[in-house]
Image (cartoon, helix red, strand yellow):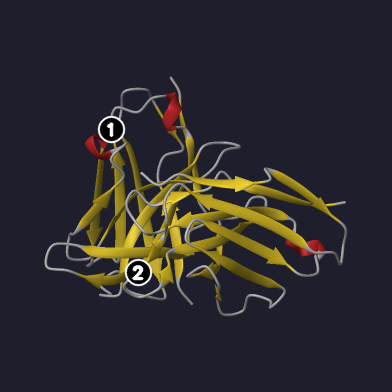
Amino acid sequence: DIVMTQSPDSLAVSLGERATINCKSSQSVLYSSNNKNYLGWYQQKPGQPPKLLISWASTRESGVPDRFSGSGSGTDFTLTISSLQAEDVAVYYCQQYYGTPYSFGQGTKLEIK
Amino acid sequence: QLHLQESGPGLVKPSETLSLTCTVSGGSVSSSDYYWGWIRQPPGKGLEWIGSMSYSGDTHHNPSLKSRITISVDTSKNHFSLKLNSVTAADTAVYYCARHRKGSCSSTNCYLYYFDYWGQGTLVTVSS
């Protein structure tokens, strides 16, 4: 099974500042035949279901603000919020879909400093 | 706009069977581009994929739960269901249904990707 580990567990950032969340997989999720990273990022606000923000490690879903960006390859990935807004307070999860069982990181709680 | 809604009992006794249904509106469970999945989240904890099924009956299960779960799809009612038997307190969680993007298929298997639409979730408590 592929284990996803996020860091930090929680993060407090000032409004307008950059927030960076890391995700590490226990094995590579880069599929060599198509050079795609099988990694997604989700945002979960309190009392709501997760919302898909980014697929393929760096492809923003439709309607997701461009302050959200994903990067990385292989086993190490990053979600960056370039300028934190109040509405970005949430728990963020990474998910690998390279292999079954599909697995999520433990989550990173993002708060306003 | 696709909408998914979970329904079912909020309280289940230990050793009994948890049964949930996810009703899909604004789209069809018969779509060949998607599977239909279940994910759960124990209170205050992270997300665990339970399993996913296509309209044609192909199923992917989490091995940690495989022996206890049954997923089914009813195309006539445009809904899909989860049954989890022999529940314990450890099965207490918010259960989400979600659309699971399907990728390419080999002769024996389809690759599944991310979950792009989720229901609001339903809390199921296992307690006597």
Q: Which residue is mark 1?
A: B85
Specify few, some or many for label 1: CA neighbours under 10 Å numbering under 14, 14-19, or 20 or more. Answer: some
Spot occupied by residue A20 in the image (x, y as percentages of width and height): 71, 59
Where is residue A66 drawn, in percent x and y?
Answer: 69, 78
Place residue B52 in its image quadrant. Answer: bottom left
Which residue in the protein does label 2 denote? Answer: A32
Image point (44%, 27%), residue name: B90
Query: Badge 1 sits on which subunit?
Result: B
Give whichever of A99, B68 is nearer the camera.
Answer: A99
User: Pointer 2 indicates a residue of which chain?
Assistant: A
Q: Amino acid at mark 1?
A: Asn
Which x, y percent locates residue A71? Answer: 59, 68
Q: Could you say which is closer to the camera, residue A70 or residue B37?
A: A70
Residue name at image x 68 percent, y 45 percent? A8
Rounded to the nearest whole Å, what is the CA distance between mark 2 and mark 1?
A: 39 Å
Asked which secondary structure carries label 2, the reply is: loop
Q: Is residue B50 left or right of residue B69?
A: right
Where residue B43 appears, as percent x and y from the top left, is 57, 36
The answer to whether B21 appears left or right of A15 in the picture is left
Residue at the (57%, 38%) spot, across then down: B45
